[in-house]
Image: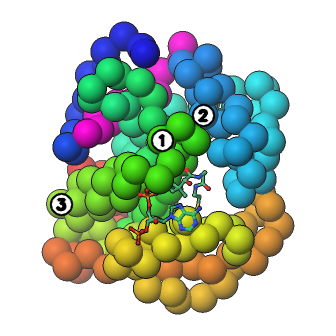
Amino acid sequence: MHGSRDYFLTSERLGFSHWREDDLALAMTLWGDPKVAAFLGGPFTPEEVSARLSREIAMMIACKVQYWPVFLLENNDLVGCAGLRPYTNDGHILKLGFHLRPDYWGQGLAHEAARAVIAFAFETPAIESLFAGHHPANEASERLLKKLGFRWTHEEIYPPTGLMNPAYRLMNPQASEMSPQKPIWSSY
Ligand SMILES: CC(C)(COP(=O)(O)OP(=O)(O)OC[C@H]1O[C@@H](n2cnc3c(N)ncnc32)[C@H](O)[C@@H]1OP(=O)(O)O)[C@@H](O)C(=O)NCCC(=O)NCCS
């Protein structure tokens, strides 16, 4: 249980907040867990978790997106993170990601979090589509992406593991044409 946070986005059971500089202990309960890190290139040391936290904070400042920390509305416990990061440099294609703490697996919470993030992203017509990938052995992630409507497009390398990962795309039905030179975060 943690003090309540401000939520900029909510779903039925979940509240989305922003990572803060003083969240290292909280971040350790997520990315410091070897079960969470298994398909992400971990296990991660506290220094690596701290660097990851700093990257998420920097991402929010630069691109107005991050893998936001997600809390259970019922008790403000950290469920995990779910969110976006740039996939193309212009930001017209964003990457969807979700990492949940094992206590919360198997309850449909990743699906609920991902659906909220997708709806949030697709409110911006300049976002053409979302990209997602997964470790080849991550059956839960594969199943979840297909259930969300993602379609397989190709295989590509995931640098943290050095493995080829299946890659998927979900198109934004509201997408509009925009100059490819204009970074998308300038239009938020
Ligand atoms: C992948 C992950 C996000 C799934 O979270 P979750 O909350 O358990 O997923 P959900 O309960 O929303 O289930 C989504 C679908 O995946 C299926 N699923 C969940 N765990 C599964 C497993 N271990 N094997 C196969 N399918 C699984 C569910 O049955 C469900 O499909 P269904 O509705 O057709 O039955 C979670 O396991 C996780 O955070 N893992 C560690 C970090 C990670 O690997 N993230 C993904 C990086 S690509």
Q: Residue at x 60, y 88 (%)?
A: 154
- Residue 155 falls within the magenta-colored stretch: no
Q: Nearer the viewer, mark 3 or mark 1?
A: 1
Picture layout, residue 171 above or below residue 89 = below
Residue 62 visible, this orientation: no
**Left or right, 96 with reference to 138:** left
The magenta segment: 13-22
Q: Residue at x 54, y 66 (%)?
A: 141
| Secondary element at tag 2 | helix
Nearer the observer, 126 or 99: 99
Q: Nearer the viewer, mark 2 or mark 1?
A: 1
Q: Are marks 3 and 2 in contact (CB under 8 Å)?
A: no
Q: Position of residue 152 (x, y in %)?
A: 51, 87
The disc at residue 30 is 2
Amino acid beneath label 2:
Leu
Q: Categorize mark 3 by other alpha carbons within 10 Å: few (<14), some (14-19), many (20+).
A: few
Q: Which residue is mark 1?
A: 104
Nearer the observer, 106 or 88: 106
Q: Categorize mark 1 by other alpha carbons within 10 Å: few (<14), some (14-19), many (20+).
A: some
The answer to which image quadrant residue 149 occupies is bottom left
